[in-house]
Amino acid sequence: MSTWESVDLRAFYDGREFEAWRWMGSRLAGDGADFRVLAPAASGASVLLSTPDGETREVPMTRCLNGAFLEAHVPGAREGDRYEYRIYLRDGGFQDHCDPYGQEMELRPAHRSVVCDLGHYEFSDDAWMASRTACQDRPLTIYELHAGSWRKPGPDPDAWYTYDELADLLIPYVNELGCTHVEFLPLAEHPFDGSWGYQGCAPFSATSRYGAPEQLMGLVDRLHQAGVGAILDVVPVHFAIDAWGLANFDGTPLYEYPNDAVGVSEWGSHNFMHSRGEVRSLLASAADFWLGAYHFDGLRLDAVSRIVYWQGDERRGVNGMGADFLRELCDGLHARHPGCMLIAEDSSGFPGVTRPTAEGGLGFDYKWDLGWMHDTLSYFQASPEERRHAEGRLTFSMMYFPNERYLLPLSHDEVVHGKATIAQKMNGGYDGKFPQARALYLYMVAHPGKTLDFMGNEFAQLREWDEKREQDWCLLGYPLHDAFLRFRRELGAAYRAHSALWERDYRSDGFAWLDCEQLAPCCTAILRRSEGERVAALFNLDSAEHEYAVPLPEDEKGAVGVTVLLDTDWQRYGGSTPDGETVCHIGDGVLVVRLAPLSGVLALLA
């Protein structure tokens, strides 16, 4: 294990160092603190240290290790002191930067790093950490949220709950919703609120918007003790252009490409140069840091297609060094953090994203199925008349599903920039959107693959997400929205209770179409299997009621009974069918159910 005194420079320059966070940045030591920074092209560097009483002093740094690094011991430095590096350039000028490896920062727009000690917090989640898995044969339903706008203590855009206050509110809510994991949009420090964390400046610093690092550790710890996993979005593709951040760090493009043709992203940010070992080690160490120091259970890597293809454009070809970086990253993190899950947000057709690296794949546990998302939402946006000729939008996903371990996302990206929220996307007027949204979420649960849903969708938020405002919780005062949340809670409970819906997500014997050819207009039916049970999901997405008769496969014709687990049209969900009175039976190998318009039924076969 690397320490401040023991450094493997060969691993660092090869891009195989996962613990540079242990020997870079700042560290309390003796009568003060030690500081170390990489700046090979600088003519010199110093530490600018500011104490709480307003004193600022400049302490020169000296070359160390192979000469590309500079370090200094600063007597009297204390936890909580602010600092930055003054990097002297070869043209005679200088630029002040925050610490690339710093583990805490000031609240924006201030941008200095903070001397901190992450050893204060003691976790109490040993049992959780020892038993966690990537959940491939377990339930996995993820609640995605932005920590600053899920709930807010006041209307001011800068009014935020702290990490520990967030835990008080979030944990009981997520447990009632039936979600197994929470996924946070990026929490690494970032200068601009409107980037949502996706244009960062300090890969190792938990944003100070919501409190201190120990408070974030406490949030993760308390989630674990409540039986909820924690996943973090990380951004290994690009970073903010602010001069005090990583950009042109030592007067040269140390972390980014020197050529704007590949060095500038479509968002105007700087692209990391994944062919440089120093960059790979920075990113690998940051990933290791969040999993190790903070006990996160998984990482969702943003914009993976921008790493495996040049600028994310398949026509430009594969970036071999980028793909190699991902393989080494996945293998290294899996070896170092048993049971962690690595999720690729990848919109490309790059093959083998979730295949083991030994078989030529990238080694991720899951890949977002953005094709499923687009096709499904397109279907539900269409009128029932159009749906009669568009059944392929619901069924096509199963043509390619065996190629990867897919996760079905209805994420933050689908509720912004004029796209409308999930409920608002549903065809028709206000009242007609709710039954369709209920059917959509039952279809999502019945489809193979783990699931992710963004905050607000669970109570049919109708206003697009705005990071400056909290969700419209006032909607729960309206019967249809309150009933929709009740439906989502009971659907979540049914999902977790029935192994057929998750145990064999990635096995061919876990899924079968009962009907994908519309035996009745706009109707389809799915069979899910596990070791212990068989569950059918039947859908009528037409505007008329249908008595839907579906022949069972030969190996299921022995089924003699059926229990309705959930009907999206029950009155307690805002529908018209009296609770528990869904007409459903099996006879002569045929499953028959009376389906209200725009509804779905989940049934257990016996």
Image (cartoon, helix red, strand yellow):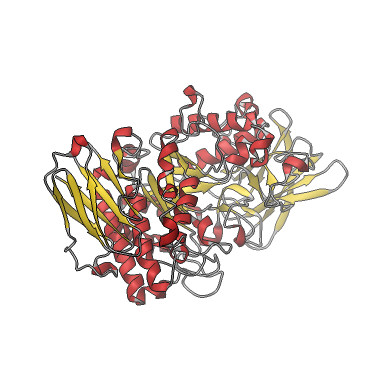
Count of marks, rendered view: 0
Picture coordinates of residue 29 (x, y %)? Answer: 57, 42
Picture coordinates of residue 235 (x, y %)? Answer: 58, 46
Which residue is pictured at 85% across the width and 40% down the height?
90
Which residue is pictured at 51% across the width and 61% down the height?
415
Q: Residue furthest left?
A: 560
Is residue 107 at least partly visible in the picture?
Answer: no
Q: Left or right of 526: which side holds 72?
A: right
Which residue is pictured at 35% across the width and 46% down the height?
517
Asked which quadrant contains residue 67, the reply is top right
Q: Left or right of 182: which side holds 41?
A: right
Along the line of sight, which residue is nearer the eye, 11 or 264?
A: 264
Along the line of sight, which residue is nearer the eye, 511 or 413?
A: 511
Picture coordinates of residue 4 (x, y %)? Answer: 58, 34
Q: Residue furthest top?
A: 358
Q: Is residue 91 above or below residue 476?
A: above
Along the line of sight, which residue is nearer the eye, 468 or 358?
A: 358
Q: Is residue 317 above or below residue 179?
A: above
Q: Residue furthest right?
A: 91
Q: Left or right of 89: which side holds 144?
A: left
Picture coordinates of residue 191 (x, y %)? Answer: 64, 58
Which residue is pictured at 51% across the width and 75% down the height?
155
Q: Quadrant of the C terminus?
A: top left
Q: Is residue 594 above or below residue 73?
A: below
Along the line of sight, which residue is nearer the eye, 84 or 157?
A: 157
Is residue 478 at least partly visible in the picture?
Answer: yes
